[in-house]
Amino acid sequence: MRVVRSRLIPYRLPLRQPWRSAHGAMAERSGWLVSLESANGLVGYGDCAPLPEAGTERAEDAGARLQTALPALIGEEAETLLAHLDAAWMTMPAARCAIETALIDLLAQRAGMPLARWLNPAASLAPRVNAAIGGLDAGTAARAVQALKEGFAVLKVKVGVGEPHSELHVLRRLADGLPPGAKLRLDANGAWEEVTARRFIDGLAELPVEALEEPLAKADFQALQRLQDVARFSLALDESLAGAGRELCCDYLPVRRLVLKPMVLGGPLAAYELARRARRAGLECVATTTLDSAVGTWAACHLAAALGNDLAHGLATAAWLAEDVGNLPHFTDGRVRLDNRRCGLGFCRFAE
């Protein structure tokens, strides 16, 4: 399948309200769509949405690299381009993600199947999803209630933004309002040193916590092992995977879970290959977005479906965007529903 046309389309998407984490607040999401057209008229899309605090390159570096690289794709076969992405792109995961996603979107369309089934023929097309309810602020309880009404059973909360004792107090009140079976998934974004993380984990002992992502500012494996040994729930690596995805040895990791973000790991195929190694080592894997545009959301949803597990994945983030670049997957009853009749990503861009 020969690529005959490429486009780089910038976007800037305001958020409905600031997205707060231990790294600060974000008011908009910006990046580029990559569009690749094949000789037989198919169009594949990819999203480049750099987020350095999550482990990607800087936005200006990604944009410059794509502007240089895209013209060189013209006339080449998609399979050949995909096979040669790695060596030159390892330091540019968000830019690589955009090109890889557009290429495998084309290949899955040609194969006549959803991207999830192209990655894994046994993929489920209705993976579970957690609700992203943001940080612990005055609106957290209301967002939790709304998420529960929409059928979500796992609520993801950003922690490590405020004083730990105060956050634990708010979490206890939030947990008191949860129905049986509902769980909290916490993300500290590398907020703490080991002593504080240990105290926080101890304070969660009686709460319905499903996992805690990136508790430590520095991914000290010995410290993480000590924390995992005392935690009742899974600790997870997320930002710490940046730059190590293809070289990571999963057999000796100190946590039970990996958080796989296509934007950080270089694309959904790159993330899926890491997941295969992780599963062999007995690790849990969840797929999440990095608060991406609709294209990035589609890519993460197909990755989650290809993983084929019953964990809730971090995919329902597009509601934080006040506008988007195209259609979104369908979320209902705490799941994302991918249509078996939609080939490739299933993305359709809004008219300009």
Image (cartoon, grey):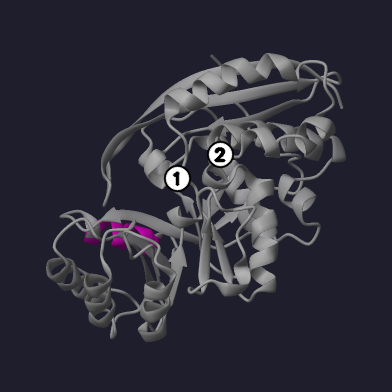
Q: Horizontal placement of 39 versus 243: left or right? A: right
The answer to which quarter of the image holds residue 185 is bottom left
The residue depicted at 36 percent of the width and 85 percent of the height is 230
Q: Which residues are magenta?
A: 141-149
Asked if the stretch drawn in magenta spans residue 145, the answer is yes
Is residue 9 depicted above or below 340 in this figure?
above
Residue at 56% from the left image edge and 22% from the top image edge = 65
Q: Identify which residue is drawn at 27% across, 77% down.
A: 198
Depth check: give the residue in front, 8 or 40. 8
- Relative placement, left or right, of 109 versus 284 is right
User: Upstream in the sequence, badge 1 or badge 2?
Assistant: 1
Task: Give amino acid for label 1.
Answer: Gly
Q: Nearer the viewer, residue 196 or 172?
A: 196
The type of residue carrying mark 2 is Pro
Task: Residue 152 in the image: state x and y as whole percent.
Answer: 44, 63
For residue 241, say whether it is visible: yes
- Residue 225: x %, y % from top left: 43, 78
For residue 93, which numbered disc appears in the image? Answer: 2
Image quadrant in which you'd find residue 195: bottom left
Identify the residue position indicated by label 1 in the image. 55
Q: Is residue 304 above or below residue 106?
A: below
Work out whether residue 301 or residue 9 is closer to the camera in this orientation and state it. 9
